[in-house]
Image (cartoon, rainbow, N blue to C red):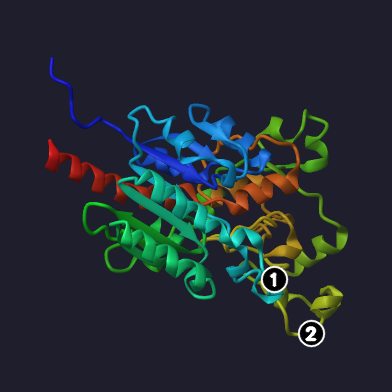
Amino acid sequence: MSVKKNPDFFVAIDLFAGGGGLTAGLKRAGFKVCAAVEFDTLAATTYTANHPETVMFSKDIREVSSEELLSTSPTNKIDLIAACPPCQSFSSLTAKYKRKDSRDELINEFARMVREIKPRTIMMENVPGLALKGAHLFNPVIQEFKDLGYSISYRVLEVADYGVPQRRRRLVVLGSLSGDIDIPESTHSEGGTDGKLPWVTVRDAISHIPQPMPLTKAKTKGGPRAVGWNVCRVLAPQNIERLRASKEGGSRADLPKHLRPACHQEDFGFTNVYGRMSWDKPSPTITGGCTTLSKGRFGHPTRLRTISVREAAALQSFPDDYDFASDFIDRVCVIIGNALPPRFAEMMAARCYSKLKGENRVHE
């Protein structure tokens, strides 16, 4: 009996895996994810709760060898290395602090794994600022990939243009050893122009989710994880008044001066706080503060509460049954806010999958 030269599946590795949003997208695109690396133990626990078939290396990537990762592959090779290396210093949300973060240079660990494993395709997602303020790190890595023989494409994309119910701009890099690989064209647009689908809205994403439980009550019901993390924080009376005065889709600029915090009394500084989302638009960027009114426009469009943790996850395009394996709300919100939206990851990974399928057909 003849043996197929090429398997019926493609194998991927997820670096800086967080709680598994990228892996969820890789799997939806058709990849078998054999290994993941994540230093944060709580994020790694959430990852494993949802992707138990993947070998998790819960340690500093600098202590992980390419041989260890390669040994997990059922085909003894890797078709895709996907990575979301932390580059917080180049995020627009942290730019004002102008602090150097030692984690910024972890992009070089992604480059090391690519250099040593030589996967057929590569995929990286990051903040847009990496290609600008972080050019001293980004450009040498891109050049190394080209020197290794990869054709590289990169572009800053809006995730709402790919069916995610959220406004979030991300830098995407795709690479292939077998010729050009293009960034996928968008599938959605504001208003559904140019023959594309309209943006997915907050209403589309969360209106089916039942009314959440206050966090304090959830703690008496076995913990927030036991109720699927459909919980929200109990707001102070003054924050309830702020929401009462807020307009759908508005910000702290809508608040009368007496309801503004002292640091927001004047018309300067961040305005994108103490506001509500719009039902019929994508949400603002979901961050680690996604259930805290002072950290963004995270008020529910019509109710006197913030969005719930489960609603935040839905706006990141996580499935409703995704298990956030902790009972600490701050940590779970960070896992959700740091994630690459699975829907967006799927769209990018599908391009790599198609490239690999085409390459296999040529060699069969």
Residue at position x 66%, y 57% from top?
A: 300
Secondary element type, mark 2? loop
Secondary element type, mark 1? loop
Query: Can residue 189 be seen by looking at this rendering?
Result: no
Characterize the local packing of mark 2: few (<14), some (14-19) or many (20 or more) Cα atoms within 10 angstroms.
Answer: few
Quick one: 296 or 257, which is closer to the camera? Answer: 296
Residue at position x 64%, y 71% from top?
A: 250
Nearest to N terminus: mark 1 or mark 2: 1
Of the 4 image quadrants, the one containing the C terminus is: top left
Badge 1 is on which residue?
A: 99
Label annotation for residue 266: 2
**In screen coordinates, is 206 left or right of 228?**
left
Quick one: 331 or 187, which is closer to the camera? Answer: 331
**Residue 266 horizontal/vertical position (percent):** 79, 85
Q: CA distance from mark 1 to mark 2?
A: 26 Å
Up/down of 81 relative to 90, above or below:
above
What's the residue type where badge 2 is placed? Glu
**Residue 49 horizontal/vertical position (percent):** 59, 30
**In screen coordinates, is 31 left or right of 237?**
left
**Residue 1 horizontal/vertical position (percent):** 13, 14
Q: Nearer the viewer, mark 1 or mark 2?
A: 1
Residue at position x 76%, y 41% from top?
A: 328
Query: Can residue 265 be seen by looking at this rendering?
Result: yes
